[in-house]
Image (cartoon, rainbow, N blue to C red):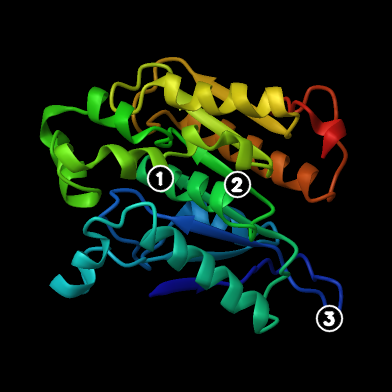
Amino acid sequence: MAFYYPPCNADVAPPPDSRPPLIVIGHGGPTGMASNTLKLATQFWTSRGFAVLDVNYGGSSGFGRAYRDALKGQWGVVDVEDCVAGARYLATRGVVDGERLLIRGSSAGGLTTLCALTFHDVFKAGASYYGVADLAGLDADSHKFESHYNEYLIAPKADAAVAYLLRSPSNHTDQLRRPVIFFQGLDDKVVPPQQSEVMVEALRRSGVPVAYMTLEGEGHGFRKADSIVRTLEAELYFYQVVLGLRASEPGAPVAIENLAGA
C-alpha cells in the first residue's frame, strides 16, 4: 500500500519523454502510517520535479491486525523490502527514472532508509532524519514508553543479539556505498547524535559522499520553522548535486564531503 504523487508545477514543463526522479518515503513509528492528507513537505518535492511514493509498508497501522503483524519480528526487513518493491515497480513501468531513485525517512524511517541503502542496490542516495542506525543502542537510549518496543519488532531481548547485529546498518558500513545526508537534533534523547555520527564517520573514512547537518535546540523531530526550511533546502541541494542536476557551490545549504569520489 502506498500513495504516489507525480511531479506537478504549472510553471515548469519537463522535457518531452523524460521520467522524473523518485523519492520514496518510509514513515516513522515504525508502526505508524502514511496518509493522503495535505502535506506541504510532499508538495515541496513535487513542485520541484520529484515524484513521491509514500509507503505504508507491512506493519503500518490502519489496515487490520494481520497487516500490522507483518512487521512482528521483521523490522528492518519487511519495511525495507516493501519500499524497494514500490520503487522497482514504478521504475519497471516507466513511471519514474530507475537510475534516479531516492529514499528518505525519519527516526524508524531512518532505519528503513539506511537498511535500504546498505543492503540493497536500488537507490541512488538517501536522507536520514535522526534515524536509527544501531538497534542495540536504541534499546539502551529509548524512553520508558518504548522500552520494550523492539521485543515486538525484532525479538525478545534474550534472543535479539544476532538480529540486532544483522539488521543494524552501523555494523555493516562497509556495504554502504551510496551518498547519504544526515540530519540530527543535538538535544535528541530518543535517537541521540552518536547514532548518526557513527554512520557519518564511516562514510567519511570510506570516501562515500556524505553530508551532516546538526541543529541546536532540536530533539526527536524538528519543531522550529527555520529548522524545517533549512533541512528541506539542504536535502534538495544534496539530491541535485549527487544526481548531477547542479554543481556543488560555495555557500550552499550544506557541505558535501567526498564528492570528488562520487
Q: Is residue 59 above or below residue 261?
A: below
**Precedes in sequence: disc 2 or disc 1:** 2
- Residue identified by numbered label 1: 167
Q: Quadrant of the C terminus?
A: top right
Identity, as a three-letter code, of the amino acid under mark 1: Arg
- Residue identified by numbered label 2: 126
**Precedes in sequence: disc 2 or disc 3:** 3
Residue 99 in picture, x, y percent from top left:
75, 64
- Residue identified by numbered label 3: 17
Picture quadrant where residue 5 is located = bottom right
Count how many numbered circles sit on residues in the image.
Answer: 3
Q: CA distance from mark 2 to mark 3?
A: 26 Å
The residue that appears at 57% across and 35% down in the rendered structure is 173
Identity, as a three-letter code, of the amino acid under mark 2: Gly
Q: Quadrant of the N terminus?
A: bottom left
15, 66: nearer the viewer: 66
Residue 147 in picture, x, y percent from top left:
14, 33
Q: CA distance from mark 1 to mark 3?
A: 39 Å
Residue 160 in picture, x, y percent from top left:
24, 41
The residue that appears at 32% across and 45% down in the rendered structure is 163
Decide if residue 242 is in sight here.
Answer: yes
User: In terms of secondary structure, where does tag 3 sit?
Assistant: loop
